[in-house]
Image: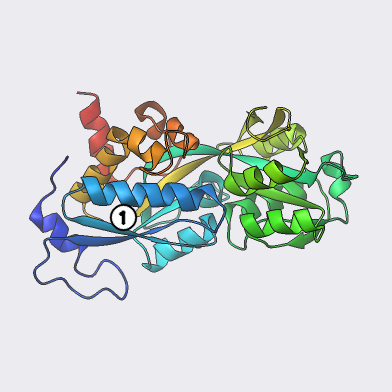
Amino acid sequence: MVLFSRRAVLLAGSGLLVGCSPQPEADTVHLRLATGPAGAVYRRIGGALAEHISEQVPGATVTTVPSGASTDNIRMLRAGEVHLGLTSLDALITSDGSAPGGLSAICRLYDSHLHLVVMAGSAIDEFRDLEGKRVSLGAHDSGTEFTSRRVLQLGPLKADAWNLSQAGSAGALRDGTIDAMFSLTGVPTPAITELAQRHPIRLIPLDAQADGLFTAYPGPYAPAMIHAAAYAGVPATRTVAVPNVLLARDDLPDDLVYAITDTVFRHTGAITSAGRDGAEDLPEAWQINVRTGISTATVPLHPGAAAWFRDRKR
């Protein structure tokens, strides 16, 4: 474990968060981590991170805050409602390639893949068939909504857009309330896994859309493949991948962020298993590693995280 100074704990516990009261005897620091909606990987991996930071960083307690996901998490961070949060890189980087002020990255975690899901018997066979169809773009203020709207705009294609959570989208697709759903998430993702286990589904290829995003918005996008073993009965499907990062407010003390960074990379195995359901509970966490963790594009590393990566090179 990495110890951080008492001064750092005092600073972190005494007014960094809007609405927090000072901690006069502060031997502990209470942090809030914005995660995501029900049925999403963000909710599970955020919970695992909170659990292990609380266990491994002396004096720290982390509470998770459910949210709409990426865009909602960025809003809460900037408003001072949370200290830490998960986001997709494309939702964070502005049109001029910069990141919003007041926030910095602790590390890159894993890549999300854009899923376009339909039921097996659907008449939708390719992306252009979404024209005029009822399509869930993900929860409002989520990374799924942000990226899927970009994809539709690049089409250009007009759909009857719905804003449903991961779990809500899967249920509505199953019931025939909607015709298709987008999901930008880790592979596999719980809501789609559960749907595929009970009902035959298909994934619509998005390789052309991946090329379009890569050209229009250089930096956060890369062509990718959802592998054949991801979902029951679904063959490998080409799509686009987007990195996810763990963000911190700039005003978190360097020593505290150093300790959080150390926990993320030294306890990846524990985070992956989440201490509950075995080694395959959070398979996307196996992507967490030092080599890619420092790759946060134009988003600056928090000074505490940067110091940890520098120390790893010594």
Q: Quadrant of residue 237?
A: top right
Q: Quadrant of the C terminus?
A: top left
Please say if 205 is above or below 100: above
- Please determine whether, in this image, residue 160 is positioned above or below residue 269: below
For label 1, the SS is: loop
Q: Position of residue 28 (x, y in %)?
A: 16, 60
**Near-viewer residue (57 or 55):** 55
* Residue 160 against residue 22 in the figure, above or below: above
Residue to which mark 1 is pinned: 250
Amino acid at circle 1: Asp
Q: Please identify the quadrant where the N terminus is shown.
A: top left
The local crowd at label 1, few if under 14, some if 14 to 19, many if 20 or more residues have their Cα within 10 Å, is many
Total numbered labels: 1
Pinpoint residue 119: horizontal percent, then vertical percent.
80, 45
Residue in the image at 62% along x and 63% along y: 140
Foreground residue among 146 and 53? 53
Left or right: residue 29 compared with residue 47: left
Q: Is residue 280 left or right of residue 198?
A: left
Point 63% across, 29% down: residue? 224
175 or 82: which is nearer to us?
A: 175
Viewer can see residue 36: yes
Q: Position of residue 192 (x, y in %)?
A: 65, 45
Colouring style: rainbow
Specify the farthest residue to the top: 314
Left or right: where 96 falls relative to 288: right
Residue at horizontal 82%, vertical 41%?
120
Viewer-side residue, 273 vs 61: 273
90 horizontally vs 115: left or right: left
Q: Residue at x 74, y 36 (%)?
A: 206
Looking at the image, can residue 220 be seen?
Answer: no
- Image coordinates of residue 151 in percent, x first then y, are 72, 46
